[in-house]
Protein backbone atom coordinates (compact mmCIF):
# COMPACT_ATOMS: atom_id res chain seq x y z
CA UNK A 1 0.00 0.00 0.00
CA UNK A 2 1.07 3.64 -0.38
CA UNK A 3 2.59 5.49 2.55
CA UNK A 4 -0.01 5.40 5.32
CA UNK A 5 0.62 9.01 6.33
CA UNK A 6 -1.06 10.19 3.14
CA UNK A 7 -4.26 9.29 5.00
CA UNK A 8 -5.78 11.25 7.85
CA UNK A 9 -4.08 14.53 8.73
CA UNK A 10 -1.30 14.18 11.26
CA UNK A 11 -0.71 17.95 11.24
CA UNK A 12 -4.02 18.37 13.11
CA UNK A 13 -2.88 16.31 16.09
CA UNK A 14 0.89 16.97 15.95
CA UNK A 15 0.64 19.87 18.46
CA UNK A 16 -0.32 17.33 21.13
CA UNK A 17 3.18 15.80 20.91
CA UNK A 18 5.23 19.01 20.50
CA UNK A 19 6.84 18.47 23.91
CA UNK A 20 8.51 15.28 22.60
CA UNK A 21 10.69 17.21 20.13
CA UNK A 22 11.55 19.86 22.70
CA UNK A 23 12.67 17.25 25.23
CA UNK A 24 14.60 15.34 22.58
CA UNK A 25 16.57 18.43 21.53
CA UNK A 26 17.47 19.23 25.13
CA UNK A 27 18.40 15.64 25.97
CA UNK A 28 20.97 15.35 23.15
CA UNK A 29 21.62 18.35 23.68
CA UNK A 30 21.32 20.30 20.43
CA UNK A 31 23.75 23.24 20.19
CA UNK A 32 23.74 26.44 18.16
CA UNK A 33 25.45 26.04 14.80
CA UNK A 34 25.16 22.26 14.60
CA UNK A 35 23.85 20.62 11.44
CA UNK A 36 20.72 18.76 12.47
CA UNK A 37 18.44 16.48 10.45
CA UNK A 38 14.85 15.82 11.54
CA UNK A 39 14.01 12.47 9.95
CA UNK A 40 10.32 11.93 9.24
CA UNK A 41 9.75 15.53 10.24
CA UNK A 42 6.03 15.58 9.44
CA UNK A 43 4.61 19.03 10.08
CA UNK A 44 7.86 20.12 11.72
CA UNK A 45 7.65 19.72 15.49
CA UNK A 46 11.21 18.57 16.12
CA UNK A 47 12.79 20.56 13.28
CA UNK A 48 11.27 23.72 14.73
CA UNK A 49 12.53 22.83 18.20
CA UNK A 50 16.07 22.39 16.87
CA UNK A 51 15.90 25.64 14.90
CA UNK A 52 14.78 27.52 18.02
CA UNK A 53 18.05 26.34 19.54
CA UNK A 54 19.87 28.06 16.65
CA UNK A 55 20.97 24.88 14.91
CA UNK A 56 21.24 24.64 11.11
CA UNK A 57 18.24 22.42 10.49
CA UNK A 58 17.09 20.14 7.68
CA UNK A 59 13.79 18.27 7.67
CA UNK A 60 12.93 15.26 5.51
CA UNK A 61 9.55 13.59 5.04
CA UNK A 62 7.80 11.64 2.24
CA UNK A 63 4.45 13.45 2.58
CA UNK A 64 4.21 16.77 0.65
CA UNK A 65 1.16 18.07 2.55
CA UNK A 66 2.92 17.67 5.90
CA UNK A 67 6.04 19.37 4.54
CA UNK A 68 3.94 22.31 3.42
CA UNK A 69 2.56 22.70 6.92
CA UNK A 70 6.10 22.53 8.29
CA UNK A 71 7.24 25.29 5.91
CA UNK A 72 4.30 27.46 6.93
CA UNK A 73 5.09 27.02 10.63
CA UNK A 74 8.77 27.80 10.10
CA UNK A 75 7.92 30.93 8.10
CA UNK A 76 5.52 32.09 10.82
CA UNK A 77 8.30 31.83 13.42
CA UNK A 78 10.93 33.30 11.11
CA UNK A 79 13.05 30.15 11.25
CA UNK A 80 15.24 29.03 8.34
CA UNK A 81 14.82 25.28 7.82
CA UNK A 82 15.49 23.36 4.62
CA UNK A 83 12.63 20.90 4.12
CA UNK A 84 12.97 18.13 1.53
CA UNK A 85 10.59 15.46 0.29
CA UNK A 86 12.28 12.08 0.50
CA UNK A 87 12.65 8.66 2.06
CA UNK A 88 14.60 7.69 5.16
CA UNK A 89 15.74 4.56 3.36
CA UNK A 90 17.64 6.62 0.75
CA UNK A 91 18.71 9.90 2.29
CA UNK A 92 19.56 12.67 -0.20
CA UNK A 93 22.58 13.86 1.79
CA UNK A 94 26.32 13.25 1.63
CA UNK A 95 28.10 11.00 4.09
CA UNK A 96 29.08 12.69 7.32
CA UNK A 97 26.71 15.62 6.75
CA UNK A 98 25.18 15.95 10.23
CA UNK A 99 26.20 16.38 13.83
CA UNK A 100 22.78 15.22 15.00
CA UNK A 101 19.96 13.17 13.49
CA UNK A 102 16.62 13.31 15.31
CA UNK A 103 13.31 11.57 14.75
CA UNK A 104 10.14 11.89 16.82
CA UNK A 105 7.98 8.84 16.03
CA UNK A 106 9.03 9.11 12.38
CA UNK A 107 11.85 6.72 11.47
CA UNK A 108 10.15 3.91 13.40
CA UNK A 109 7.51 3.61 10.65
CA UNK A 110 10.06 2.77 7.93
CA UNK A 111 9.24 -0.70 6.59
CA UNK A 112 12.85 -1.18 5.50
CA UNK A 113 14.19 -0.19 8.88
CA UNK A 114 17.60 -1.78 8.27
CA UNK A 115 18.17 0.56 5.31
CA UNK A 116 16.98 3.55 7.35
CA UNK A 117 19.36 2.78 10.23
CA UNK A 118 22.25 2.30 7.79
CA UNK A 119 21.47 5.62 6.12
CA UNK A 120 21.38 7.45 9.43
CA UNK A 121 24.80 6.01 10.31
CA UNK A 122 26.12 7.04 6.88
CA UNK A 123 25.07 10.70 7.12
CA UNK A 124 26.20 11.13 10.74
CA UNK A 125 29.66 12.48 11.49
CA UNK A 126 31.97 10.09 13.41
CA UNK A 127 31.21 11.76 16.73
CA UNK A 128 27.56 12.38 15.87
CA UNK A 129 24.42 11.63 17.84
CA UNK A 130 21.26 9.86 16.67
CA UNK A 131 18.24 10.25 18.95
CA UNK A 132 14.71 9.06 18.24
CA UNK A 133 11.50 8.10 19.99
CA UNK A 134 9.17 5.09 19.91
CA UNK A 135 6.01 4.10 21.76
CA UNK A 136 6.72 1.79 24.70
CA UNK A 137 5.45 -1.77 24.36
CA UNK A 138 2.12 -2.05 26.19
CA UNK A 139 1.49 1.71 26.16
CA UNK A 140 -1.86 3.15 25.09
CA UNK A 141 -0.58 4.01 21.61
CA UNK A 142 1.14 0.65 21.17
CA UNK A 143 -2.07 -1.19 22.05
CA UNK A 144 -4.08 1.17 19.85
CA UNK A 145 -1.82 0.24 16.94
CA UNK A 146 -2.19 -3.45 17.78
CA UNK A 147 -5.96 -3.17 17.38
CA UNK A 148 -5.49 -1.30 14.10
CA UNK A 149 -3.29 -4.10 12.79
CA UNK A 150 -5.86 -6.69 13.87
CA UNK A 151 -8.37 -4.84 11.68
CA UNK A 152 -5.89 -4.10 8.87
CA UNK A 153 -3.07 -6.69 8.73
CA UNK A 154 -1.59 -4.88 5.72
CA UNK A 155 -0.38 -2.01 7.95
CA UNK A 156 3.18 -3.33 7.81
CA UNK A 157 4.84 -0.05 8.78
CA UNK A 158 2.76 0.01 11.98
CA UNK A 159 3.94 -3.50 12.85
CA UNK A 160 7.54 -2.33 12.43
CA UNK A 161 6.87 0.71 14.61
CA UNK A 162 5.63 -1.59 17.38
CA UNK A 163 8.92 -3.55 17.24
CA UNK A 164 10.80 -0.35 18.13
CA UNK A 165 8.92 -0.28 21.44
CA UNK A 166 10.32 -3.61 22.62
CA UNK A 167 13.23 -2.91 24.96
CA UNK A 168 14.80 -6.32 24.44
CA UNK A 169 14.87 -5.89 20.65
CA UNK A 170 16.25 -2.36 20.33
CA UNK A 171 20.01 -3.02 20.83
CA UNK A 172 20.02 -5.79 18.23
CA UNK A 173 18.24 -3.56 15.71
CA UNK A 174 20.95 -0.91 16.07
CA UNK A 175 24.23 -2.59 16.96
CA UNK A 176 25.44 -3.17 13.38
CA UNK A 177 25.93 0.60 13.04
CA UNK A 178 25.96 2.05 16.56
CA UNK A 179 28.35 1.16 19.34
CA UNK A 180 26.46 2.89 22.12
CA UNK A 181 22.70 2.66 22.66
CA UNK A 182 21.01 4.25 25.67
CA UNK A 183 17.28 4.26 26.36
CA UNK A 184 15.42 6.80 28.52
CA UNK A 185 11.84 6.25 29.65
CA UNK A 186 9.51 9.20 29.19
CA UNK A 187 5.79 9.83 29.45
CA UNK A 188 3.39 11.87 27.35
CA UNK A 189 -0.01 12.91 28.71
CA UNK A 190 -3.02 12.50 26.41
CA UNK A 191 -5.99 14.74 27.17
CA UNK A 192 -9.51 15.16 25.80
CA UNK A 193 -12.94 16.20 27.03
CA UNK A 194 -13.97 12.53 26.92
CA UNK A 195 -12.78 9.14 25.71
CA UNK A 196 -15.20 9.53 22.81
CA UNK A 197 -13.62 12.85 21.82
CA UNK A 198 -10.15 11.29 21.96
CA UNK A 199 -11.27 8.46 19.69
CA UNK A 200 -12.99 10.86 17.29
CA UNK A 201 -9.70 12.73 16.82
CA UNK A 202 -7.79 9.50 16.27
CA UNK A 203 -10.32 8.31 13.67
CA UNK A 204 -10.17 11.57 11.71
CA UNK A 205 -6.47 12.40 11.87
CA UNK A 206 -4.17 9.54 12.99
CA UNK A 207 -3.40 7.49 9.88
CA UNK A 208 -3.34 3.93 11.33
CA UNK A 209 -6.69 4.47 13.04
CA UNK A 210 -8.15 6.25 10.01
CA UNK A 211 -7.18 3.29 7.82
CA UNK A 212 -8.47 0.74 10.32
CA UNK A 213 -11.95 2.22 9.84
CA UNK A 214 -11.66 2.52 6.07
CA UNK A 215 -14.44 0.63 4.33
CA UNK A 216 -16.17 -0.57 7.51
CA UNK A 217 -19.95 -0.65 7.53
CA UNK A 218 -22.01 0.69 10.43
CA UNK A 219 -22.03 -2.47 12.54
CA UNK A 220 -18.33 -3.22 12.01
CA UNK A 221 -17.38 0.39 12.76
CA UNK A 222 -19.47 0.29 15.94
CA UNK A 223 -17.68 -2.87 17.04
CA UNK A 224 -14.29 -1.24 16.54
CA UNK A 225 -15.54 1.87 18.36
CA UNK A 226 -16.44 -0.27 21.36
CA UNK A 227 -13.00 -1.92 21.43
CA UNK A 228 -11.11 1.37 21.21
CA UNK A 229 -13.31 3.17 23.72
CA UNK A 230 -12.75 0.28 26.15
CA UNK A 231 -8.99 0.62 25.56
CA UNK A 232 -9.15 4.35 26.26
CA UNK A 233 -11.18 3.79 29.42
CA UNK A 234 -8.64 1.26 30.70
CA UNK A 235 -5.90 3.90 30.48
CA UNK A 236 -7.95 6.89 31.65
CA UNK A 237 -6.61 7.97 35.06
CA UNK A 238 -8.99 10.87 35.64
CA UNK A 239 -12.45 10.04 34.25
CA UNK A 240 -13.93 12.76 36.43
CA UNK A 241 -11.97 15.22 34.27
CA UNK A 242 -12.80 13.68 30.88
CA UNK A 243 -9.88 11.79 29.40
CA UNK A 244 -6.40 11.96 30.94
CA UNK A 245 -4.05 9.12 30.04
CA UNK A 246 -0.29 8.76 30.51
CA UNK A 247 1.35 7.39 27.36
CA UNK A 248 4.85 6.00 28.02
CA UNK A 249 7.43 6.27 25.25
CA UNK A 250 11.11 5.56 24.76
CA UNK A 251 13.83 8.08 23.92
CA UNK A 252 16.70 6.19 22.28
CA UNK A 253 20.18 7.70 22.02
CA UNK A 254 22.82 6.20 19.75
CA UNK A 255 26.45 6.95 18.96
CA UNK A 256 28.26 5.56 15.87
CA UNK A 257 30.66 2.66 16.13
CA UNK A 258 33.56 4.97 15.30
CA UNK A 259 32.74 7.43 18.11
Image (cartoon, grey):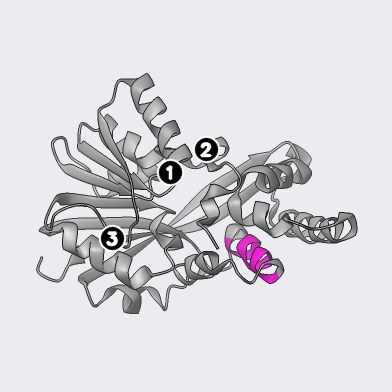
Residue 13 place in picture, x, y as percent: 57, 39
Residue at left 35%, top 52%?
103
Residue at left 56%, top 54%?
247
From this view, report whether residue 191 is shown above or below residue 122: above
Element at badge 3? loop
**Upstream in sequence: badge 1 or badge 3:** 1
Report the magenta stretch's main SS: helix
Q: CA distance from mark 2 to mark 3?
A: 24 Å
- To which residue does mark 1 refer? 42
Residue at left 42%, top 54%?
106
- To which residue does mark 2 refer? 11
- To which residue does mark 3 refer? 90
Element at badge 1? loop
Residue 11 place in picture, x, y as percent: 52, 38
Left or right of residue 152, residue 224 in this image: right
**Upstream in sequence: badge 2 or badge 3:** 2
Q: In this orientation, which residue lies closer to the viewer: 250 or 66?
A: 66
Q: Mark 1 packing: few (<14 Cα in 10 Å), some, or many (20+)?
A: many
Left or right of residue 35, residue 16 in this image: right
Residue 258 place in picture, x, y as percent: 9, 69
Element at badge 2? helix
Task: Write the start and end of the magenta stretch as one range.
Answer: 142-150
Amino acid sequence: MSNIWNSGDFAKIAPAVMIVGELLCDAVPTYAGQRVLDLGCGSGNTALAAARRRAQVFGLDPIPTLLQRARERAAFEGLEIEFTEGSAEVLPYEAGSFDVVLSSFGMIFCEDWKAAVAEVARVLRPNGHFAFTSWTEGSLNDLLFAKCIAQRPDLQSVSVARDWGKLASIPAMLRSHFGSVRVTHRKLLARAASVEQWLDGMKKFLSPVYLAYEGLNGAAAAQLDAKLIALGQQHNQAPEHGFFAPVPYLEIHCRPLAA
